[in-house]
Amino acid sequence: MQLFRSFVKKEFYHIFRDVRTLLILFGLPIALILIFGYVVTSEIKNAKIAILDHSKDKITTEITNKILSSGYFILSENLKSAKQIEEVFRQGEVREVIIFEPEFSKNLSKTGQANVQIITDASDANTANLILNYTRAIIQDYSMSLNKIPAQSIKIIPQTRMLYNEELKGVYMFVPGTMALILLLVSAMMTSISIAREKEMGTMEVMLVSPLKPLQIILGKVTPYFVLSFINAVTILLLGVFVFGMPVKGSLILLLGESMLFILLSLSLGILISTVSPNQQVAMFISMMALMLPTILLSGFIFPIENMPPLLQWISHIMPARWFITVLKNVMLKGTGLLFVWKESLIMIGMTVIFISMSVRKFKVRLE
Amino acid sequence: MSKEIIISVQNLMKKFGQFVANDDLSFEVYKGEIFGFLGANGAGKTTAIKILCGLSTPTSGKISVAGFDAYTQTNKIKHNIGYMSQKFSLYEDLTITENFRFYGGIYGLNKKQIQDKTKQLLERLKLEDAKDKIISSIPLGWKQKLAFSIAIMHDPKIVFLDEPTGGVDPITRRQFWELIYETAHQGITVFVTTHYMDEAEYCDRVSIMVDGKIIALNSPKNLKNEYQAKSMDEVFLKLTRN
């Protein structure tokens, strides 16, 4: 135990004396989460919209004016038929099309209800969502102002459709995605680099000659990173919840447990990388190329997996982050329990076991 | 000098597939002597040292280090040996004291033992004032002596030095050998590999390895007589050329 303590203590010295390590450990997570966060919540200005007005009466004109005078939207064109909708979206300029049903005012005064359809280009899910909410708010505002005059309730019902990404997956992706990315970065990259550094400096040799067992060396190496990664996970969660209003509907204990599992997975990956890299540069390179980029591109962090070609969808199955992101989304957004994420959890446990057994084998081979 | 045997190697074989790295090595090292382990690169020195340090299992042969068996008691062996390599193996971002504390810790010394040992060894090197300096800021010669002091911090029976003087200037090398002598006088056996033939002259006995075999083992003086050479350099060249 005393042996273990002096090992971990030494590891903390390494971490706290290296400015670059500290920056990656604590600066990067906060910077990333704030950047991603504010990209998502940034305001929309001058989004181009098209309007298809089937009734062209007083109320639709008023609503149109109200929307266009809000400052958020610019009218790109007035459409004449529904066929043009697809066309304007394809040109890529227009973000949203608003369609008023025929006989809008008449319906409203007769039945107290009228329909307006809002179609957005959700290939950029975040922007689409924002535009939609702004438009909805304006229409609601208008319908409230109508209600003030007559006593009867009048409803304008916006019917919305998010084209190209119907369920709008990806809106709250940035917190789970960034969390997966950062934990992977901190755990896998930092451990692999720090073990590779021991090899490079020749200190690994001395430790192997000492009575320390390989398992003790590995445990001593990963313990500090496990602790720091967990602190990071909690920081990101707190930022997500309190700064960006990310809900945590499911069990907090399950969430933290799954985070620990993913940290373990990343650490075992880092150890594996370090056993195959002779020096720090190689360790860093492998971590970057083999972990970071595929994680960003293929885990569903930025691009929805459903929209990928089958081959890439298949590859995404071996991305550890994919499963963690799914778990986070389920637990945080949908509030599901272990019953619904056991498959993902099992896959992550399986991956951890595979990586650890592979590294132990490599470790022994290297000793021979 | 006492003739107590501290390392005993009989018919050591180590094969990697078809390749024979150590071919039927047999030798003994006595307690308190400075034993030179010479050979060209690739002669099999490193493989033999790894086996003696308990890092690698021999293919066959009977090997005992500090009284322990190299097949079954590697952990006991590890407790009784010290090791220092050409890379010095100090943590550059830790201070001298912290390095002592870490290495003392992994050999299971307690706080008091570590403090006493650190003080004693630093006094011997006259580096007490530098104890809080970061390793990366001190000269190479100091690092080398510190690495050696750390290797013998837990009072091992044998200390293995793998090319300990690589890249160090002649004066520092000379000082380093004085340190080695002092250690040997205290009864710690020194097992040293080196490229420098002038250093081979300082050893009590020298073995010379070629292609996995030991082809000569004797004191430098006897070897020079036997091969009618003026220096160990000549002995080495005569042996390795044939």
Image (spheres, coloured by chain):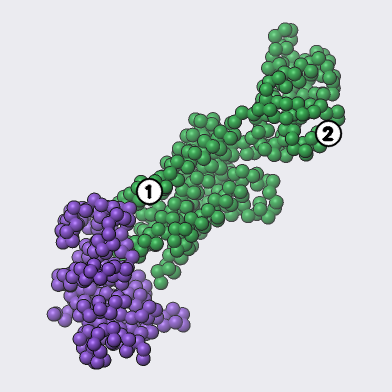
Q: Which of A196 and B241 is in front in this view?
A: B241
In the figure, A65 relative to B6: above or below?
Answer: above
Residue drawn at x 53%, y 46% is: A181
Provide residue A248's location: percent of width, then percent of height. Answer: 53, 34
Residue A107 in view of the camera: no
Residue A60 visible in image: yes
Tell which chain the image draws in purple.
B
Q: Which of marks 2 and 1 is in front?
A: 1
In terms of sequence position, does the residue under pointer 2 or pointer 1 come before the other? 1
Side (left or right) of B139 relative to A292:
left
The residue beneath circle 2 is: A84
Q: Which residue is drawn at 61% across and 49% down?
A: A298
Judging by the rendered image, the residue that carries numbered circle 1 is A18
Left or right: where B55 falls relative to A342: left
Which residue occupies 18% across, 75% down?
Answer: B32
Mark number, residue A82: none
